[in-house]
Image (spheres, rainbow, N blue to C red):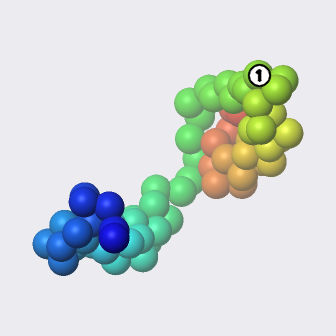
């Protein structure tokens, strides 16, 4: 038996709409790429599973226009 929150098509519809919107969201986000000089500082605790990813996340932000990113 599915969870009660997804028991009917009407309850599933909003969830499916979120996934249907992803291509439009990606297109919109692409228009926002460009120089952005807002300073960003990314941090994660040493035991966080994200700690090893901080340099990669920072590089992704830099590639997409963020000019002041520190980890």
Q: Nearer the viewer, residue 71 or 34?
A: 71
Q: Is residue 34 above or below residue 19?
A: above
Q: Position of residue 16 (x, y in %)?
A: 31, 74
Q: Position of residue 45 (x, y in %)?
A: 76, 22
- Left or right placement of residue 11 versus residue 46 in this view: left
The answer to whether residue 71 shows anywhere in this view is no
Report helix, strand or loop for mark 1. Answer: loop
Q: Nearer the viewer, residue 16 or 24?
A: 16
The answer to whether residue 34 shows anywhere in this view is yes
Q: Is residue 62 above or below residue 68?
A: below
Residue 66, quarter of the rendered image? top right
Residue labelled with disc 1: 45
User: What is the quadrant of the N terminus in the image?
Assistant: bottom left
Q: Position of residue 35 (x, y in %)?
A: 58, 47
User: What is the quadrant of the C terminus in the image?
Assistant: top right
Q: Which residue appears at 76% of the width and 30% of the height?
A: 48
Q: Nearer the viewer, residue 65 or 21?
A: 21
- Left or right placement of residue 18 versus residue 42 in this view: left
How many numbered callouts?
1
Q: Which residue appears at 25% of the width and 60% of the height?
A: 4
- Left or right placement of residue 16 versus residue 53 in this view: left
Residue situated furthest left in the rendering: 10
- Left or right placement of residue 71 versus residue 1 in this view: right
Q: Which residue appears at 62% of the width and 26% of the height?
A: 39
**10 Å crowding of disc 1: few (<14), some (14-19), many (20+):** few
Q: Is residue 16 above or below residue 65?
A: below
């Amino acid at each position: 038996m599915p969870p009660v929150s997804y028991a009917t098509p009407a309850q599933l519809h909003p969830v499916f709409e979120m996934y249907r919107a992803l291509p439009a969201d990606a297109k919109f986000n692409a228009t926002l790429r460009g120089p952005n000089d807002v300073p960003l500082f990314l941090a994660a605790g040493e035991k966080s599973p994200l700690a090893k990813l901080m340099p990669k996340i920072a590089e992704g932000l830099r590639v997409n226009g963020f000019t002041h990113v520190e980890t």
